Amino acid sequence: MPTFNASRMLSFDLETTSVNPTEARIVTSAIVSIDGRDVEAKETLADPGVEIPAEAAKIHGITTEKARAEGRPHDEVLQETVDAIKRGWEKGLTLIVFNAPYDLSVLRALTSDFTVTGPVYDPYLIDRARDRYRKGKRNLTALSEFYGVKLENAHEATSDAMAAARIAWKQVNKIWPELATMDTDELMEYQAVEYYELQIELRKFLESRGRDSTDVTTAWPMIS
């Protein structure tokens, strides 16, 4: 099996209608292909076919009116996104997804049959696993600052995808180069195990304080 090459990546990000991946519909989809010095980014605005809640529009800045007026049909954008990911895997690219269980589970819920057929690298999970006890926030804005990478416009899908790719490159090439020695199957297994352990810790923490833990999932890179 090949090892993870952080110079050959396909970074992916969605902005959606909901934080619940089983209910979310796509508002924008961004795919950034990185092959050495060749970088190609494509972002597509979709009409999700439903009202975009005000709280979601406040985050990504896209209103129902804008999506209806300028967006392409939702199912076309969904299919193009899935096709682009599959082509990337066929080319041997590693899919970079910040908080993979959300975005990939959105695709699974919307298609009912999306499956992971290639390597996935989740820079958010890697940060949590490798630097478990560091204090502070770990959202994309915070991690971009921590790793010293550029985030042009938070919650704009292409900017988010580019920042995630830059964090992944930094993690593998500058901070934890041993990750680059793992073959892609080993890297996938490592992330799945680390995610499981982190989520079990979270579940125990919540239960110890009498809080609901039923929404804490342990499957990676998709929750369903």
Image (cartoon, grey):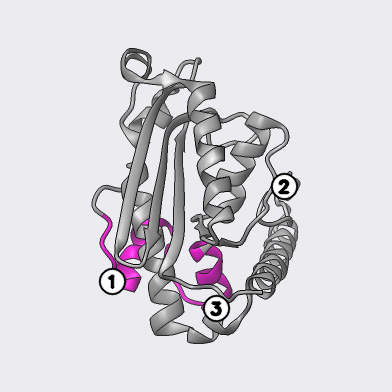
Where does the image place residue 2, in percent across and percent down from the top left?
Answer: 60, 74
Q: Pointer 1: what residue?
A: 148
Earlier sequence position, callout 2 versus callout 3: 3
Q: Distance of mark 2 from mark 3, alpha carbons?
A: 27 Å
Q: Which corner quadrant holds the C terminus? A: top right
Quadrant in the picture for residue 143 = bottom left
Where does the image place residue 115, in percent across and percent down from the top left?
Answer: 70, 45
Residue at 67% across / 51% down in the picture?
116
**Dot 2: what SS?**
loop
Where does the image place residue 6, in percent across and percent down from the top left?
Answer: 44, 71
**Residue 138 in sight here:** no
Label number found at residue 130: 3
Q: Pointer 2: what residue?
A: 212
Question: Which numbered disc, 2 or 1, marks the residue closer to the eye?
Answer: 1
Question: Closer to the camera, 131 or 4?
Answer: 4
Question: Closer to the camera, 216 or 218?
Answer: 218
The residue type indicated by label 3 comes to: Arg
**Dot 1: what SS?**
loop
Earlier sequence position, callout 3 versus callout 1: 3
Residue at 45% across / 46% down in the picture?
13
Label number found at residue 72: none
Quadrant in the picture for residue 194 = bottom right
**Dot 3: what SS?**
helix
Is residue 153 magenta-colored?
no
Q: Distance of mark 2 from mark 1, alpha carbons?
A: 36 Å
The residue type indicated by label 2 comes to: Asp
Point out the stretch of residues depicted in magenta. 123-151
